[in-house]
Structure formats: C-alpha cells, structure tokens
Amino acid sequence: MNNTSVTRAVINLSALQHNQQVLKAYAPNSQFLAVVKANAYGHGMVEIARNLSGIYALGVARLNEALVLRHAGITTPIVLFEGFFHADDLETLVTHNLQTVIHSEQQLNAIIECKLDRPLQVWLKLDTGMHRLGFQAEEFEQAYHRLASSANVLQPINLITHFNCADELDNNITATQINTFKSHIKSNSGLNSLANSAATLAWPETHADVIRPGIALYGVSPFANKLAEDFNLQPVMTLKSQLIAVRAHQAGESVGYGATWTAKSDTTLGVVAVGYGDGYPRMAPEGTPVLVNGRLVPIVGRVSMDMLTVDLGNNPTDKVGDDVTLWGEGLPATDVANHIGTIAYELVTKLTSRVALQYVP
Ligand SMILES: *Cc1c(COP(=O)(O)O)cnc(C)c1O
C-alpha cells in the first residue's frame, strides 16, 4: 500500500451489481433508474455509471452532473430531478439528450415558449405531500395539458412524484401520497415513477413503471432502524484507514483538542489517519464505533482534521499499519450514523477529495 492511499474508500463493484439485482427482484416489472447524483452518493459517478448495465436511465439532480457523465462518454438516458434552472439551458438538454423534470410554473413557461430543434422528454412532477418541488393537485391538470400540446415536448409525458416518509413503515402519509398520485395518472400513457429506495423495498404498490433507488443501490439502508443486510444488500463503500500510532495511555490523561475525554484507567490509544478533513464527521461523539482487527472499539476525544483516536483497551495486539474500517464491510454506515445523529446518506456523500476511491471488481 503506498502512502497516498492509506485513507481510502474501497468501492466494491460486485456489491453494486449484486444490489442492483436484489432491487430488481423487488420490482421485477419495473424499469430501473439508477440515482447517481452527488457523485453517486460519494462513490464516483462516472465509474458507477460505467458499471451498471441494463438500466433504463441515470438520475442526477442538476445539469452540471449530467454533463460530467456525457463528457465521460456515458450515453445512457439521464433524468434531471431538479430540471433546468435557466431557459438558456434547454439547448444544452437537447444537445446532450437529457430528460428533465418539470416541477414549477417557471420551467413550464420556459419549455413552452422556447424554440427547440428537437422535443425533450419531460417528467411532470406532482407534489403529493413533500411540498418542496412539484405542481399542486389543482395546478397539475393544466400543466399536463400545456405540455401535452407543446411541440417542444416529446409525447407522451412521464409523471413523477417523491415521498417524504417512505422510510417510516407505519407512517400513513405514504399511503395518502400513493392515492393522490394514482388519482392523477389515470389517463397518462407515459411512464409513472414514485419509488425511491425505501419505497422500492417497503411499499410494493409504488413500483409502477420506473423505480428510482439511490442509497440502497450502494448497499446502505434507507431506514434508520433496519440494516442493509436485512434486505440482503451489501455495502459498496468501505471507508478504510490505518493506525499511524499505538500509544500507552495512563489513567487521568486526556487526549486531543479540548481535552474532552480523560482515561479512567490505564489503556492503549490508537491514532487513525482519518478526520473531518476527509469527511469523517467532527461531531462523532465518544463511543462511536470503529472496526480494528475484527473488533469494535470506541472513538475517544474529539475528531480532528487529520486524525481520530480510539481506545484499544489493555494490552492490544494492534500495531501501527493495521487497517481500520470506519464504515462499510463489517460496520454498517447506518450504525455509525445513528451514533453521530445523522443518516448514512450524509456520511458516504461527504467524503472529501483527499480520500482516494479504490475500485475493486
Ligand atoms: C435522491 C432521489 C432519489 C433516490 O432516493 P434514495 O432515498 O437514495 O433511494 C429518488 N428520486 C428523487 C427525485 C431523488 O431526488
């Protein structure tokens, strides 16, 4: 292992393909839109796109993400979930064969009033309860008819909605959203899409024509209280580093900035070469688990920019250069996220450019 890759995110491509098959089996009659926004949730957008086959489309939030894929030679259809932000961008969408969500009056007017060389595939978004993007029920019919009669819009139109509580299995908001969506799609001959990861796994009635899993494709549970392995999903990312120091530590001594933790008894501390400068959250409290040589040990003291410290206990056999897992294989990101008070989505997405992505087949 060379010096540049001591701290790395190992990306397991067979786990990615395995997860794709698992999700497909949940929704065998639906097409598969793989969500690769935010650099494929930190896994490397281009590399992930290259390693998915048999998919209907890729999903990104914004135009600049789609252009990265196109410039890398990816020709799969791409859907922009936030759509375009300026009328000027519509030309670019045509040039690069990008599909767009239409969620607002501004986007609706822009696409109808412009002059395009070729019509665009659109996904009209119905707001069924998230109340972030999308047309309200009252505005939806009119928006649909305006798009249906526009020469700039490829027919038929596709319809989309997004859930805000699908990860809560006993929350009836989702059932209400499903009913609202279904009442609006009766006469639609285009594709209908509702399901994110949580809905794909837990709400079969949402599968419709196209499922849109993101986090589950990366082998991370969309649920706070269920692990990926409960669904036979395998972690794609394993964040690894190494012990760069192993030190005897006496009772009464503190460690790290602010001296926030003091040893109650003699112990051994391990210093791991990962910190908030790599995207490991500074807010991780004492006790957050780290996997060292097959056992979970607690973080002690504050996470600093380049390092964190763990309590290895008495007379450990761990030594400098031993591998350490921060999350992934053997330590679900969901467990780490629950300790920190965040969600695993944020952990995997926030790695910085200092962390090398190391792809393994
Ligand atoms: C991010 C996103 C998804 C994927 O959500 P996951 O919870 O990661 O599966 C699906 N649809 C839309 C519109 C999104 O923005």
Image (tube, rainbow, N blue to C red):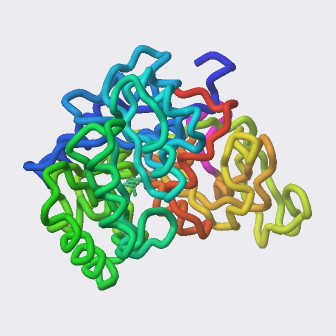
Nearest the viewer among 23 and 267 is 23
Q: Is residue 126 above or below residue 102?
A: below
Residue lying at 28% horizontally and 60% vertically, measured from the top left = 194
Say left or right for 347 vs 21. Answer: right
Query: Is residue 263 in view from this perspective?
Result: yes
Magenta part of the chain: 316-323
| Magenta run includes residue 319 | yes
User: Who is closer to the viewer here, 252 or 97?
Assistant: 97
332 sits left or right of 322 in the view: left
- Principal secondary structure, stretch drawn in magenta: loop
Residue 10 showing in the rendered view: no
Q: Is residue 45 above or below residue 105?
A: above
Residue 263, located in which quarter of the rendered image?
bottom right
Relative side of 191 to 63, left or right: left
Quarter-of-image position of residue 150 = top left
Give the vertical position of 331 relative to 152 (above or below).
below
Q: Residue at x 14, y 49 (%)?
A: 30
Q: Nearer the viewer, residue 105 or 229?
A: 105
